[in-house]
Amino acid sequence: MTQLFVCHGRDDIPRWQAAFSEARLVSRQQARAQAGEGDSVWVMSHIEAWPTLVTLLSGRGAIVKVLSYAPDPLEALRALDAGARGYAHALSPPELLRQMALVTSHRGIWVPPELLAQVMGSAYRALGGESRQQDEVLSELTERERAVALAVAEGQSNKEVARRLEITERTVKAHLGAIFRKLGVRDRLQLILKLGQRETA
């Protein structure tokens, strides 16, 4: 599989070469001319009109990943919306880049765990979860479980929830296990969807 890194000359990061010895550094124009079906293309988010390039290349069947020097949830959502299969920090270690390539080559989606919580929190707010908390759903939880569920839905990590509620991360995990069981969900994403769903008449 061809590995193309679309970047400026100054973006020649040694760890990219360490991850993929056969990787080629190309310009935006070269990527447009060369990338095709099944190629693995890594696009830097600070190059001009990167979302347009991502959409073009993914439309051709290339497996596109976006790398950023300053990752943030909104940019991650923009990358995925443009057709990227993954999003990560440009200075990620070689092993992580290889894992990302493997996951995306099998049509999976890759977003760093610490960013995923923030992306999910954005999704919760976009669904109107904060203004439409499901009292009926939350009534099944204890007061502390309710606090944990809402904090997680806002995109907070276990560590952040523990700090906010002044409990241990182990206790947060225990509460999450109880929350998932009581609400019949498997993970944080399903929890957010459950809390953000619209009530039907």
Image: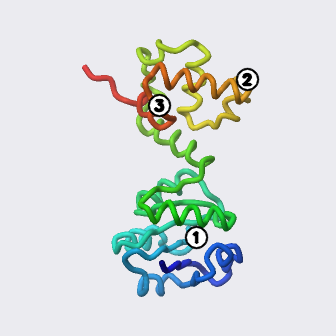
Q: How busy is the neighbourhood of tag 3: few (under 14 within 10 Å), some, or many (20 plus)?
A: many
User: What kind of element bears circle 1?
Assistant: loop
Helix, strand, or loop for circle 2? loop
Residue at label 1?
A: 46
Disc 2 target residue: 167
Rendered location of residue 47, percent (x, y):
55, 74
Return the residue nearer the eye: 185 or 30: 185
Is 129 positioned to the left or the right of 168 in the image?
Answer: left
Distance from Cα at disc 3 to Cα at disc 1: 34 Å
Q: Secondary structure at mark 3?
A: helix
- On the image, the x and y values in percent for residue 105 come to 46, 66
> Which residue in the structure is indicated by mark 3?
191
Q: CA distance from mark 3 to mark 2?
A: 21 Å
Task: Residue type at mark 3: give it.
Answer: Leu
Give the residue displayed 74% in from the left and 26% down from the top: 168
Where 136 sits versus 169, above or below?
Answer: above
On screen, 103 above or below 201? Answer: below
User: Is the residue marked by circle 1 packed among few (<14), some (14-19), or many (20+) residues within 10 Å?
Assistant: some
Nearer-N-terminus badge (3/1): 1
Residue 87 appears left or right of 157: left
> Residue 18: x and y, percent?
68, 75
Q: Nearer the viewer, mark 3 or mark 1?
A: 3
* Mark 3 or mark 2, earlier in chain: 2
Sequence-first tag of 2 and 1: 1
